[in-house]
Each structure stands twice: as structure tokens, then as C-alpha cells.
Image: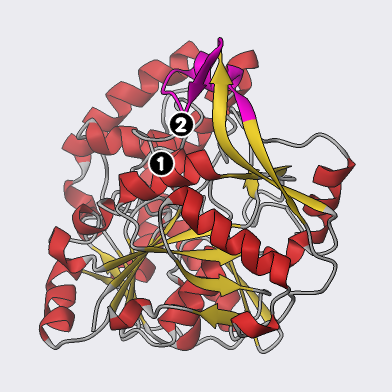
Amino acid sequence: MANVTVIGAQWGDEGKGKIVDWLASRADAVVRFQGGHNAGHTLVIDGTTYKLSLLPSGIVSGTLSVIGNGVVLDPWALKAEIEKLEAQGVTINDDNLAVADNCPLILPIHRDLDGLREAAAGSGKIGTTGRGIGPAYEDKVGRRAIRVCDLAHLDALEPQLDRLCAHHDALRAGFEQEPVDREQLLAELREIAPFVLKYAQPVWKRLKKVRKAGAKILFEGAQGVLLDIDHGTYPFVTSSNTVSGTAAAGSGLGPNATGFVLGIVKAYTTRVGSGPFPTELDDEVGKGIGERGHEFGTVTGRQRRVGWFDAVLVRQTCAISGVTGIALTKIDVLDGLDEVKICTGYRLRNNVYDYFPSHAADQAAVEPIYESMEGWQESTAGARSYADLPANAVKYIQRVQELIETPVALVSTSPERDDTILMRDPFMD
């Protein structure tokens, strides 16, 4: 049995929650390996909706869920999310939830800095969620982070607070803010520490044991490859590496543990926030797709921008992340359209590109080259086999996999877990 790594192969919001939940029901452990509570996964199980931002999707089904060291952890957000799920009847304890003791913490001062920067950025706004993710990663790399394991040693925190406050006090002064209130910060950490430490452990050690026993591990990515700090539409990206290779570093398991890489791809394209979007639709067609697809961010509630499927971008993300097969989601949202389009290349200053250039100005200037296909009037919603799909929907799926040079492993036809057409089982490869 293979392990499986799930990543978003567009700008996030591809429907990873449902696919991860479907896979998690067959996995022995689910691992989050990057990002923070800026992720948003919506699960619909037996008509009940669960919204997750930080916890791995396996927690709803009782599967061992692990928050790896590559995640930046807001301890107060963790507590709030656990309490919300428990109110929905989900059982969460130290048997089914493990938090890496070397996770860096997101602190209130990180949220403050995130908001201050965005407010001052003017036309340079990146469109962050304002939750302190970026500043927390900066402190991790700057070697001044407070980590989960530090919560057990708060009486010895002064040297770390000196480093942390030397940095943040200078930044806060630039925004005409008061210095960090060290006593208040320590008091807040002392209050939350017992809750977080219940789940804290060296998760690499636990995962090693799980893997040695032959168990199936599902690595759950957040955001999407086009938001990767290196490979995304920089600077309109997230603050972590979202590619599949991060699963190894962000969990403490080696690169040979990642197994089948499943890229989640919408049958069209969306993104939240600022940044280039070559196939964006500002017309009634785009508006209709957005309404049918309920395109609002799980975390922010912001309306997502909508466009045609961009095969150039997905071919690129599949190559960068070593995608074995894709899961195509929301095909049902395209039902009823007379015509559907796929971007097959770009024009830029009289040249044709078969890839997305790196420079922000070039990314903003490219013009999509479209291939048009006849749409389908029949419904694909709830289909569970290829035979249930309209002929033109099948042609569309086949053309997508040809253009992205990656096979379709499964097709999702509704938010419900079982409305899935399986062509290739990731856990059997």
C-alpha cells in the first residue's frame, strides 16, 4: 500500500477537503505539513458540514491526525477549532491528535504586524488573511520563534523574548505602536500552554512507528502550488512551500515516504485575493460559474475570482510537484454551458509561451490562448461512474489530461464523499 500526498495544483480552494476526507477514511494517519490556520477545508459528511482551518481532515472520522513541524501553530485558534468540532460531536484527544513539539507558534504580535503591514501597503497589498502566518514564518527563519516545546519552559523564556522583542519593537515603532507587552504575552502563553501541551510530542517519532507498522499515511497540503513561496505567483503567494516535496521536511519523514502525489484541480480556475489570473472572467459566464460553485473562501469569506481552466498552469504545477495523478473537482459546476474553454498557451509581446513566466509584470501581461469545446446540458452532479457522465463532459476530462500531461485519477461530482468516480486508487499504487 502506498502513502498519498495531496496538494492543491492551482491557487488553493480546489476542493481538497472532500478528497482528503474520502482518502482519510481509508488512511491510518493524516498529516498537515505546512501553512497555518489560513487554510480552509470544508467537509460534508452525511449532510453535516465541518469547516477546518488548522486540524487535519482525518480528525472528523477519528483517524490519527498530526500537525507537523512545517506548520505554524496559533494555539488559540487550535483551541477554538477543537472546541467547535467537539460541539458538533467530534471526539478529539491525545490518541487521535498529535502536534509537533517543534512547531513555531503564531503569537498575537504576529497578527498585529500582519495587519499593520497590509494597511500600510496601499497598492502593494498582497491580500493576506491577516492571521499572522507570514510574520510567524519570518521569526522561524530569523531564529527567534517561540515553539510548542517552549510552552513547557516558560520560566526560561527571557533570552528568546529578548531576541523576539528586539525585532518586533523596532518594527512596531516604525508603525507608531507601543513595544511588545512582554508580561501580557507571557500571561497569555501560560494560560494556553496546558491545553496545547496535551497534544505535543515528537511527531517524527510517532510517524516513524506508524510507518514501520505498515500503516497508510496521508499527507495533507494546504493552499495550492501557485501560492508556493518559490514556485507561485510571487509576491502574491503564501509564506510556505506548498509543493509535495515539503511533506518530507514538514513532517520529519524522508522524501521516500510521500508516495502517490495527488494534485487536486478544479474543472475551472479560481483564486482569492490579489495577483495575476490570465483566464479570469469578468462577465456573466464567470459570475454564473462563481454562483453555482459557491465560490467564497472557507477562511475569509471573500468572493473568489473565477476563470476558465488553465492547462498551462496546471501542467506546470504537476511537473513542479511530481504529481502522479489529479483529482478533478466541481465538473458539475460547468453543467449547462453551451461552450467551455481551456487555456492552452499564452501570448506575450508577440511571442507564444507554453509556461507561466516568473516575473510579476510578465505574469500580469500574458494573454490566454483558448481552445473551445462544446458544453453539455445534462447533469453530472452525483455521478459515480464514467458511464453516468455526458459524452461532452468525458471529452472535456480527456482533453484536460492530455493538455496537462498527467492522468486523471478520480473525478468529484459533488461535495458528498461518495460522489466520486475512481479511475486509479492512490492507496493501491
Q: Give the crowd class for mark 1: few <14, some 14-19, many >=20 residues within 10 Å.
A: many
Amino acid type, label 2: Asp
Q: Answer with mark 2 or mark 1, whichever residue precedes in sequence.
A: 1
Does 366 lie within the magenta span? Answer: yes
Circle 1 — which element? helix
Q: Relative to 83, does residue 113 appear above or below in the rendering?
A: above
Q: Picture coordinates of residue 153 (x, y %)?
A: 19, 56
* Residue shown at 33% from the left, 38% from the top: 137
Does 156 lie within the magenta span? Answer: no
Query: Where on the picture, by quarter, is residue 347?
Result: top right
Q: CA distance from mark 2 to mark 1?
A: 9 Å
Residue located beneath label 1 in the image: 316
Q: Quadrant of the C terminus?
A: bottom left
Judged by depth in the image, the label closer to the viewer, 2 or 1, is 2
* Residue shown at 43% from the left, 53% from the top: 74
293 sits left or right of 53 in the view: right
Amino acid type, label 1: Gln
* Residue shown at 69% from the left, 77% from the top: 389
Q: Relative to 417, does residue 271 appear above or below in the rendering?
A: above
Provide the residue span drawn in magenta: 349-368
* Residue shown at 19% from the left, 53% from the top: 249
Q: Picture coordinates of residue 401 (x, y %)?
A: 49, 58
92 sits left or right of 176 in the view: left
Residue located beneath label 2 in the image: 354
Nearest the camera: 38 or 264? Answer: 264
